[in-house]
Image: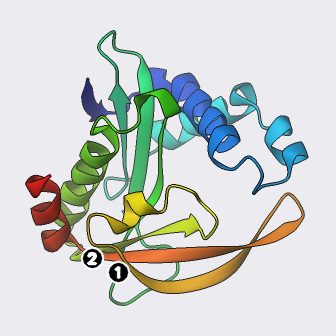
Amino acid sequence: MRVREAKAGDSTAIAHVQVTTWRTTYRGIVPAEYLAAMSAEARAPWWERQIADQHPDVCTFVACDVSGRVVGFARAGPERDGDPTHTGELYAIYVLEGHQRHGLGRELVRRVALHLRGHAHRAMLVWALAANPYRRFYEAPGGTLCRARPIEIGGVVLEAVAYGYDLDELLTRLAAY
């Protein structure tokens, strides 16, 4: 298994991972109608544009299984709300359920942290639904809760929480795994 930068031809696979992981992770949290209406086919063109027009500060990495099939991805760049401390943000990270707990998520986070640090960011944050059953993934490498806010998904207001990381400390902790 390996992690590499995403390329234009990865958009359909990234969209598939996104839709599939939302359906498995957020079942019982996000309205079922919303999850059922999600479509990899509808999401793929958005990913195609994001990868094709990607600003140098933004990165998209994919995790591939031994056959080269995309089974996870992460996207990051400058923090979007003007946080003065956490100037980088991990926008999204998803790994298909059958490929979790094999180090792919950790390697995706490591690559993101290196990219952000290389673009003068010292700290980053990541938003997660408070009810996300995989929040331990964000806590294990030293993520600290730093904010919370409501978020509307499918007509339901949920709570989102932000985990903050010092990038140097994060990279040290990830290397120790």
| Residue 113: x %, y % from top left | 24, 59
Secondary element under disc 2, as helix, strand or loop, is strand
Q: Is residue 176 left or right of residue 15?
A: left
Q: Earlier in the sequence, mark 2 or mark 1?
A: 1
| Residue 142: x %, y % from top left | 27, 72
* Label 1 packing within 10 angstroms: few (<14), some (14-19), many (20+): many
The answer to whether residue 90 of the structure is visible from this angle is yes
Relative to 3, residue 94 above or below: below
Residue position marked by numbered label 1 in the rendering? 86
Q: Which residue is pictured at 39% across the width and 63% down the height?
A: 138
Placement of the N terminus among the 4 image quadrants: top left
| Residue 5: x %, y % from top left | 30, 35
Out of 134 and 52, give the one closest to the viewer. 134
Secondary element under disc 1, as helix, strand or loop, is loop
Q: Is residue 33 left or right of residue 10?
A: right
| Residue 110: x %, y % from top left | 22, 52
The colouring scheme, among rainbow, by chain, secondary structure or one colour, is rainbow
* Label 2 packing within 10 angstroms: few (<14), some (14-19), many (20+): many
The answer to whether residue 96 of the structure is visible from this angle is no
- Between the residue at mark 2 and the residue at mark 1, the CA separation in whole angstroms equals 5 Å
Q: Determine the residue located farthest toward the top in the rendered image.
A: 67
Q: Are marks 2 and 1 in contact (CB under 8 Å)?
A: yes
Q: Is residue 57 left or right of residue 80?
A: left
Query: What is the three-letter code of the residue carrying label 2?
Result: Ala
Q: Which residue is pictured at 34% across the width and 24% down the height?
A: 64
Q: Which residue is pictured at 31% across the width and 53% down the height?
A: 56
Query: What is the three-letter code of the residue carrying label 1?
Result: His
Q: Which residue is pictured at 49% across the width and 76% down the height?
A: 162
Q: Is residue 80 left or right of residue 18?
A: left
Residue position marked by numbered label 2 in the rendering? 123
